[in-house]
Amino acid sequence: MTMPNTQYSMTFATGGLLYRESLVVADLYGELGDWDAVKDRILSANLLQIRTPSGARRIYQEVSLRLMRLTPDEMALLRRGSRQEQCYLLWLAVCKRYRFVHDFAVEVLREKFLGWDLLLTYEDYDLFFNNKAEWHPEVGRAAPSTRKKQRQLLFRMVREAGLLSQDNRILPALLTPRLGEIMARESPAYLTVFPLSDPDISEWLP
């Protein structure tokens, strides 16, 4: 299992889940099978429809670094799956890319779900942030304005993934059999980034 880096990268506040951009990149990678070729095509033709070249490079880099974390089976399902499956896979990709997001998903989102405390608040995030900052100096170095943006973007990503309602109620993940099997085959631990009960997770275990 490829877990996020041991240090926390706090550069995740870029564009939310990036659903449309991710599908453009995933489809082109499925066609070309080479990340360098994908990058050249994306940037030369402005396929992401970003106004400036620097912005296009930044968004492409973020999307590609997330998608590179997915297995071939996950990438294939991202291209052909339902929108819900796609959003779950993009959430998984973010959690693989960023240990901070991964740990928030496991330690806050899922733990609150398991305890039937379904309201996710900014106070939950702030408590998690402050706890991590005690042990990870790279977390505490974030400026207040950056911290606020990161908090907003993380809530936005959870909402775009279909795991949080508009009034910040945690929604149970509704994994399809094929998605659950693909994820469990890679590592059952990745199922814990979703609001799922232990019996739900056990359904996908070999």
Image (cartoon, rainbow, N blue to C red):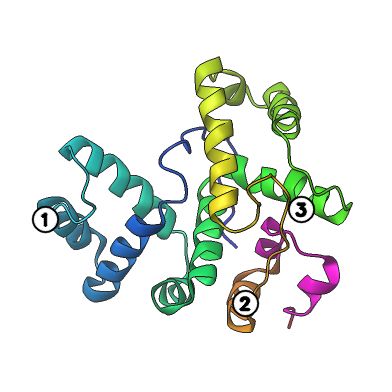
Choose top left, top right, bottom left or bottom right for residue 52: top left
Quadrant where the C terminus sits is bottom right
Q: Residue at x 58, y 76 (%)?
A: 179
Choose top left, top right, bottom left or bottom right for residue 148: top right
116 and 201: which one is in front?
116
As for residue 63 lying within the magenta part, the answer is: no
Residue 185, numbered circle? 2
Q: On the image, numbered disc 1 is attached to which residue?
A: 45
- In the displayed structure image, the side of residue 65 where residue 55 appears, left or right: left
Disc 3 crowd rating (10 Å Cα; few below 14, some 14-19, many 20+) is many
Dot placed on the residue nearer the N-terminal end, 3 or 2: 3
Amino acid at circle 2: Arg
Quadrant where the N terminus sits is bottom right
Residue 45 picture location, percent across and down: 11, 55
Amino acid at circle 1: Ala
Q: Which residues are magenta?
A: 189-205
- In the displayed structure image, the side of residue 199 where residue 105 appears, left or right: left
The answer to whether residue 143 is visible is no
Residue 117 picture location, percent across and down: 85, 47
Cα separation between marks 2 and 1: 37 Å
Task: Check disc 2 and report its element: helix, strand or loop.
Answer: helix
Q: On the image, numbered disc 3 is attached to which residue?
A: 110
Residue 22 picture location, percent across and down: 36, 59
Of all residues, the one furthest to the right in this rendering is: 115
> In the picture shown, does residue 46 fall above or below 30?
above
Task: Check disc 1 and report its element: helix, strand or loop.
Answer: loop
